[in-house]
Image: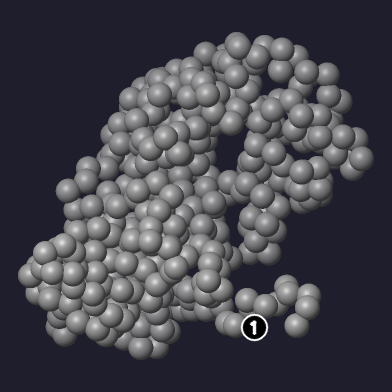
Amino acid sequence: MKNTPDTYKINKDKHIEIGGCDAVNLVKEFGSPLFVLDEATIRNRCKTYLNSFRKYYPNTDVIYASKALCTAGVLKLVTSEGLGLDVSSGGELYTALKSGCDPKKIYFHGNNKPKKELIEALDARVGRIVVDNIDELNRLDEATQETGKRAEILVRVNPGIEAHTHEYIKTGTIDSKFGVPFAQLESFIKEVKKKKLVSLVGLHAHIGSQILDPKPFADEVKFLLDLTLKYKTKELNIGGGLAIAYLPQDESPELESFAKEIASVLKDKTDVKLVLEPGRSIIGTAGVTLYTIGGIKDIKGIRKYIFIDGGMSDNPRPILYQAVYDAKIANKADQKAAEKVTVAGRFCESGDILIRDIELPEVEAGDILAVFCTGAYNYSMASNYNRVGRPAMVLVNGGDAILILERESYEDLIRNDTVI
């Protein structure tokens, strides 16, 4: 299946197995809900990105977009495969540094970075700071003057390119909060050149997320290449946004053909460094969330609900932008679909619906539900709504499961309360 981890299989007990680990046994050992990450899938995606792009355009760097999933264990893993990191906050930067990642391979993003965080980035000697607007440029200038440290920057430009994806995850259209409008770019770069300790080294754009068609990316490269040659910069950063298959019938772009198309635009401009920032397409398919089914509500002739022990707190994507998911009963992996059900979460919102009208085997309380493609933007966007702790996370490989994120306890929930 295209929407499952590379090591996914049905084992001799007719259970789902990931990374050589039985999903049912994982829940017995670590509890549920449980985020499961397949190490082999993550490593495979990192290698495929690097090999595909460097095959057609050797002067390429791949930078993992840590906003997709930022934990120390994950960052250690992707950087061990030769990827750099894209961070978009002081917290992500702190995690990256604590993980032992090379600061020179960190790109610091964000459309409203506070001066405090810009100083932290300068003190850490990050490789690049991506500047989004004039006020941020002025804050960065102040930060360089205070620290005496030089900043090498990319200017994020709004390319005005339509990417056919959900409205909330489009970032490159003219009406966007991100990037310097193209019409203002000339004057913006003049302002950059006035700053004593700020050096322009490249241009950046990002057109959106979960994009299926490579053509908008090719248009983006053409747009950025013209500007790169005009302003004589040395880096061209196209961001990320390549789609994954959330459902079995989904088609996702094939990485090698995508790389070939991008490289064909750059042709012989080998002195220009191409930088990509994939996140979801590195980590998304590697993730599976395991839930325990606690109850069933059958409204005859209307709908049958099955209730899980998680929901919008650990996966807000369906309620935010109607994201869709595929799932199976992990302990009945060999059984055929027998009924249509709706998977509902435990939280006090009517909109806390994880999956509507999915065909599953006959469901019973105590069954384990495995939801696929939950590696990206699930834990990252998780909350403590209803004062429920965020789930644990395990990394599985070769039959071993390593706890890389502990389950939040009640004590964790009140840690910052000042009146007890």
* 185 left or right, relative to 122: left
Q: Residue at the spot x=69%, y=39% of the render?
A: 112
Q: Which colour style is shown?
A: one colour
Residue 236 visible in this rendered orientation of the protein: no
Which is nearer the eye, 117 or 174?
A: 174
Quadrant of residue 148 within the rendered picture: top right
* 199 left or right, relative to 205: right
Which is nearer the eye, 84 or 162?
A: 162
Q: Residue at the spot x=40%, y=79% of the render?
A: 32
Q: Amino acid at mark 1?
A: Glu
Looking at this rendering, what residue extends furthest in the bottom direction? 28
Q: Is residue 401 above or below residue 343?
A: below
Quadrant containing the N terminus is bottom left
Quadrant containing the C terminus is bottom right
Q: Residue at the spot x=12%, y=73% of the render?
A: 361
* Secondary structure found at label 1: helix
Q: Residue at the spot x=67%, y=78% of the render?
A: 414
In this rendering, the count of numbered labels is 1
Give percent across and percent down for residue 226: 52, 13
Residue 158 visible in this rendered orientation of the protein: yes
Quadrant of residue 418 within the rendered picture: bottom right
* 2 left or right, relative to 256: left
Give percent across and percent down for residue 302: 16, 62
Which is nearer the eye, 376 or 418?
A: 418
Q: Is residue 87 above or below residue 140?
A: below
Give percent across and percent down for residue 50: 42, 45
Q: Residues within 10 Å of mark 1 (few under 14, many from 20)?
A: few
* 82 left or right, relative to 36: right
Give percent across and percent down for residue 90: 71, 52
Residue at which label 1 appears: 411
